[in-house]
Amino acid sequence: MAILQNMNEDGILEITMDNPPVNALNIDDTFEIAAIFNNVAKNQEIKVAILTASGKGFCAGVDIKEIQALSGNEGILNVNQACYDAFAAVYECAVPVIAAVNDFCLGSGIGLAGSADIVVAADQAQFGLPEVDNGALGALTHLQRLVPQQRARQMLYTCETAPAEELASYGTIYDVVPKTELMETARNLAKRIAKKQARTIRAAKRSANGIEIIDIRNSYRYEQGYTFELNLVGEGEKARQAFLDGQR
């Protein structure tokens, strides 16, 4: 996988996930996403960040093949830490983060988009958590920033996805546009923000996080505790292997 970065003259940093065929995140690249967003604090030239993906899928979740290839609990321990760091880094990024969701957004994709300040989406995008089918838990914290709590629970239990238009009806997606217009929409919004006084925008971001009702870090870490438990009793292993065997 490649995590591509580009910053334009307006001070807009674009981060693009590029891992055909479905943009599943491996451990190293998830840690890299965390490092990129954490480093924004050191670069005063950055005014806004856009997180997007190329090709098919915004993010299909973690790389299950990689987890299964690692011995013992190494895979699940590393991927959980990587996701924890990446989601927190997006949420706590020093500048506003716009998630430009080009296609299906699943699992850790929900963690990333749900950690962002603003979401724009292509009209074909679907959002969902397949965690229960994978013998894991996590990112309900972030899904609840995108859909109402009881809808989020129904999606968690059934692994059902929700279309971008539904999320827009809740006011959690700024705009739903044709895929060909997605980046233009995100960039135009980013430019509007980038024109504001930079120190004030960074203060506004800290202020917005400071009054958040839910502690994102602790809430997500609590969820992850159940993923560790499911792995200890073997449920996670069975579910991931069933996925790789094509049984679901």
Image (cartoon, grey):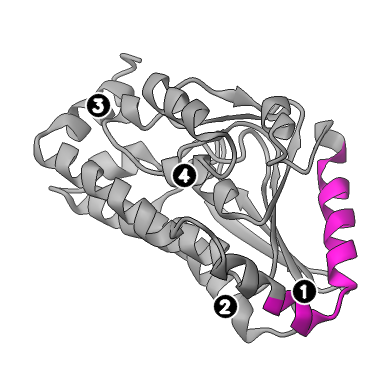
Separation (CA) of disc 2 from disc 1: 13 Å
* Closer to the camera in the image, 210 or 100: 210
Residue picked out by circle 2: 39
> Which residues are the magenta region?
181-203
Q: Nearer the viewer, mark 3 or mark 1?
A: 1
Check residue 72 in the rendering and tell me which mark sits there, or answer none.
none
User: What residue is shown with label 3?
Assistant: 239
Residue 197 within the segment the image draws in magenta:
yes
Q: Is residue 151 above or below residue 147?
A: above
Looking at the image, is mark 3 or mark 1 earlier in the sequence?
1
**N-terminal label among 4 and 3:** 4
Is residue 29 or residue 88 the one in the foreground?
88
Q: Is residue 219 left or right of residue 195?
A: left
Which residue bears the numbered disc 1?
47
- Type of amino acid under label 2: Asn
Q: Which sits earlier in the primary sequence, circle 1 or circle 4?
A: 1
Mark positioned earlier in the residue sequence (3 or 2): 2
Q: What residue do we see at 36% from left, 43% from top?
A: 138
> Which of the 4 quarters of the picture holds residue 203?
bottom right
Q: CA distance from mark 3 to mark 1?
A: 42 Å
Query: In the displayed image of the protein, which residue is found farthest to the top?
Result: 247
